[in-house]
Amino acid sequence: FDPKELLLRIKALSKRVHLPDKIKIGDVEIDLENQIVLKDGKEVKLTKTAWNLLYYLIKNRGKVVSNENILNYVWHDKAVGDEVIRAYIKELRKILPEGSIETFKGRGYKLN
């Protein structure tokens, strides 16, 4: 490898987010490896789409993620509107503790 290219590769790797296998948000435990959500010790079933949205929010925890980025990550090239995102956010809010998902009008959402 060219030393400059190697340095760029190392920097790129260091920027990647490494998530723990399990995270806890209030009374909700999320097993990222096995895609299991437990609330008060009881499993909560999520659709694949809801799981993908939750995972994307976790991956970007603490950052505002735009509707456009959510659409690209969760729905790829499918044509869905912002109202679909709102419906899934509402579903996740029923599971997560109050205030866990913050809305930034006209910008997107943030998982606290």
Image (cartoon, rainbow, N blue to C red):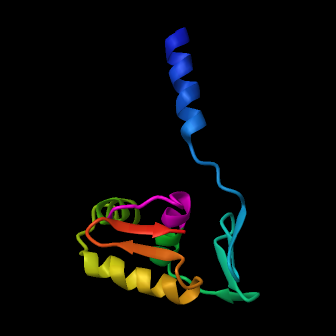
Left/right placement of residue 30 relative to residue 110 reads right
Point out residue 31 in the picture as x, y percentages from the top left corner: 70, 70
Residue beneath the point at 31% across and 80% down: 84
Point out residue 70 in the picture as x, y percentages from the top left corner: 37, 64
Point out residue 35 in the picture as x, y percentages from the top left corner: 64, 71
Left/right placement of residue 58 relative to residue 32 reads left
Q: Give the farthest residue toward the top.
A: 2
Residue 63 is a magenta residue: yes
Q: Work out whether residue 1 can be spotted.
A: no
Residue beneath the point at 51% across and 23% down: 8
Left/right placement of residue 29 relative to residue 57 reads right
Q: Quadrant of residue 32 in the image? A: bottom right
Point out residue 30 in the picture as x, y percentages from the top left corner: 67, 73
Q: Relative to the observer, which residue lies in front, 36 or 29?
A: 29
Numbered disc total:
0
Q: Quadrant of residue 107 in the image? A: bottom left
Q: Relative to the observer, which residue lies in front, 81 or 96?
A: 96
- Residue 13 vertical position relative to residue 38 in the rendered view, above or below: above
Residue beneath the point at 48% across and 77% down: 50
Q: Work out whether residue 68 can be spotted.
A: yes
- Residue 10 vertical position relative to residue 36 in the rendered view, above or below: above
Residue 95 is a magenta residue: no
Left/right placement of residue 52 relative to residue 105 reads right
Quadrant containing the C terminus is bottom right
Q: Which residues are magenta?
A: 55-66
Quadrant containing the N terminus is top right
- Residue 109 vertical position relative to residue 73 in the rendered view, above or below: below
